[in-house]
Amino acid sequence: MRSIVVANQKGGCAKTTTIVNLAASLAELGQKVLVIDLDPQANATQWLGGSGPEDGSYRLLVEDGPVKDLWGPTSAENIKIIGASQQLSSVERALAGRVAIDSILKRRLATLQPQHWDFVLIDTPPTLGLVTLNALSYAKELLIPVTTHVLTLSGVAQLMATVETVKSLLNPELEILGFLPSRVDQRTRHSKEVLDLLIEEFGPLVLHSKIRESIRLAESPSYQEAILTYDESSGAAADYRALSKEILAKKVKKGIKS
Ligand SMILES: Nc1ncnc2c1ncn2[C@@H]1O[C@H](COP(=O)(O)OP(=O)(O)OP(=O)(O)O)[C@@H](O)[C@H]1O
Ligand SMILES: [Mg+2]
């Protein structure tokens, strides 16, 4: 079982788009995927047509009942979701005064049975607050979407500093799976410049897969469909299929099965 958190505190940098379409393309390859939506905006939950128990991810962090009672079905057979709701925005208040609150998710998900899941994918909000820290403290791999239609590298240094702190204090196993260039428009000079800058800064950490700018992809959440079914022969669908294959082939470190 691999665990991947998608994070970048920059808002609108394609985190949720990555989660939903990566989940769908892994599921298409027969992988069993558990998505955990840790963003109170609940965009991933809505997009995937999640219809599980109410306030799933809030209850995951605040209550101690069995985790298996918290996930529910989505519109894709191989994808289950622990869904988010607005309630999640009050989680810090609900946890005030408790101890070791950075690693609640890690303790809670230790009960997941690894043979039941190939991937746990976690969507995070656009902040580096308690909820994102919990995700970073649990997951073994971090995927960082970066959009290239605007320069979005400004917050990345802060994210990298947080990753180093989390690795030394809470989760030594955390590795960067890679940066995922998204909304790439090869026709514009700006998109190419941002991509070049990313490769200059992070070299081999930049994934080979890139997600192109796609109107069809931007439309697909309104239909509660991943791009793979909304427009299965589109370029963006091909991009996510290539991404899932690259991730399956990539061994971030010894011990992670490919
Ligand atoms: N490849 C793409 N082509 C066109 N539009 C895209 C692409 N990827 C993402 N978008 C659009 O960019 C916007 C932001 O994407 P998304 O919601 O995935 O970002 P996010 O990082 O999850 O945002 P937030 O920080 O608010 O959670 C959405 O309107 C989405 O449709
Ligand atoms: Mg989002």
Image (cartoon, helix red, strand yellow):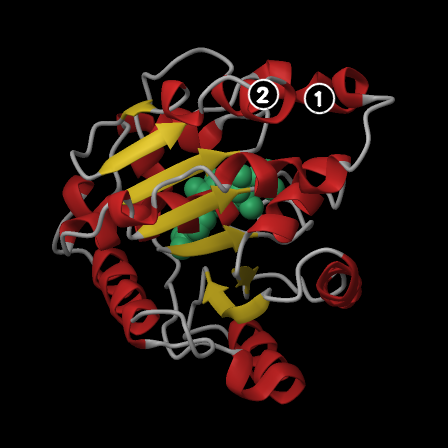
The image shows residue 211 at horizontal and vertical percentages of 38, 63
The quadrant in which the C terminus is found is bottom left
The quadrant in which the N terminus is found is bottom left
Q: Secondary structure at mark 1?
A: helix
Farthest residue to the right: give it.
Answer: 97
Relative to 102, 205 lies left or right: left
Tell me: residue 52, above or below residue 208: above
Relative to 134, 14 lies left or right: left
Q: Which residue does the image show at 76% across and 68% down from the upper left?
A: 164
Residue tagged by mark 2?
A: 58
Relative to 179, 153 lies left or right: right
Q: Amino acid at mark 1?
A: Val
Q: Earlier in the sequence, mark 1 or mark 2?
A: 2
Q: Secondary structure at mark 2?
A: helix
In the drawing, what numbered circle is on residue 91?
Answer: 1
Judge whether residue 216 can be spotted in this image: no
Q: Which residue does the image show at 63% across and 88% down from the upper left?
A: 200
Task: Pick the residue in front: 134 or 48.
Answer: 134
The image shows residue 217 at horizontal and vertical percentages of 32, 46
The image shows residue 25 at horizontal and vertical percentages of 23, 53
- CB under 8 Å between callouts 1 and 2? yes
The image shows residue 37 at horizontal and vertical percentages of 49, 33
Task: Pick the residue in front: 145 or 59.
Answer: 59
Relative to 141, 27 lies left or right: left
Q: Amino acid at mark 2?
A: Tyr
Q: Quadrant of residue 239?
A: bottom left
